[in-house]
Image: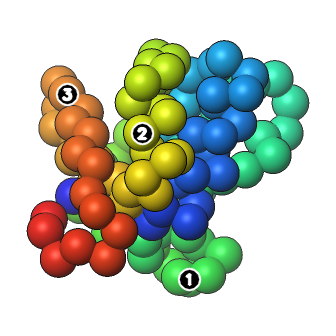
């Protein structure tokens, strides 16, 4: 499971709300969420422990959690979900299988996985 902390996630979803766009879940150089907009994204939320600039060599951990291939998955714009994430400052847990991606909002600082 991937965990995204609310302080990073909220920035991404606020932009998605403002721009009326979706959000991308990307696995390439780390694993991160970013607004689906043209050009350089103004905000990126890395999964906890999977930011190569902070966490160093993460290839094996990323491969274990998400498989070996790079990917970019589009999460459709969902006004009510995006607003709830921003207003209630949820952490976001993401599970990746071969055929599905599951999102689960979790209260900030909760021990639930």
The 10 Å Cα crowd at callout 3, few under 14, some 14 to 19, many 20 or more, is few
The residue under label 2 is: 84
- Whether tag 3 and tag 2 are in contact, CB under 8 A, the answer is no
**Residue bearing the label numbered 3:** 100
The outermost residue toward the right is 39
Mark 1 Cα-neighbour bin, 10 Å: few <14, some 14–19, many ≥20: few
Dividing the picture into quarters, in which one does residue 56 lie? bottom right
Name the N-terminal-most of marks 2 and 1.
1
Rendered view: 48 above or below 55? above
Furthest-front residue in this view: 87
Q: Name the residue under label 1.
A: 56
Rendering coords of residue 110 (x, y %): 23, 73
Q: Distance between the residues labelled 3 and 2?
A: 22 Å
For label 2, the SS is: helix
81 relative to 79 in the view: left or right: left
Residue 90: x, y in percent? 38, 56
- Can residue 5 be seen in the rendering of this structure? yes
Q: Report helix, strand or loop for mark 1.
A: loop
Q: Quadrant of the C terminus?
A: bottom left
- What's the distance in space between the residues labelled 2 and 1, CA to CA? 33 Å
Residue 96 screen position, x and y as percent: 23, 42
- The answer to whether residue 2 is seen in the rendering is no
- Image quarter in which the N terminus is found: bottom left
């Amino acid at each position: 499971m991937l965990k995204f902390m609310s302080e990073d996630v909220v920035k991404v979803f606020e932009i998605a709300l403002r721009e009326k766009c979706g959000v991308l879940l990307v696995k390439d150089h780390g694993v991160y969420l970013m607004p689906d907009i043209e050009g350089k994204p103004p905000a990126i939320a890395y999964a906890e422990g999977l930011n190569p600039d902070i966490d160093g060599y993460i290839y094996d951990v990323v491969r274990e959690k998400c498989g070996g291939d790079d990917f970019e998955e589009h999460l459709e714009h969902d006004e009510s979900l995006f607003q709830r994430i921003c207003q209630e400052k949820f952490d976001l847990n993401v599970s990746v299988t071969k055929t599905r991606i599951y999102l689960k909002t979790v209260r900030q600082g909760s021990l639930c996985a």
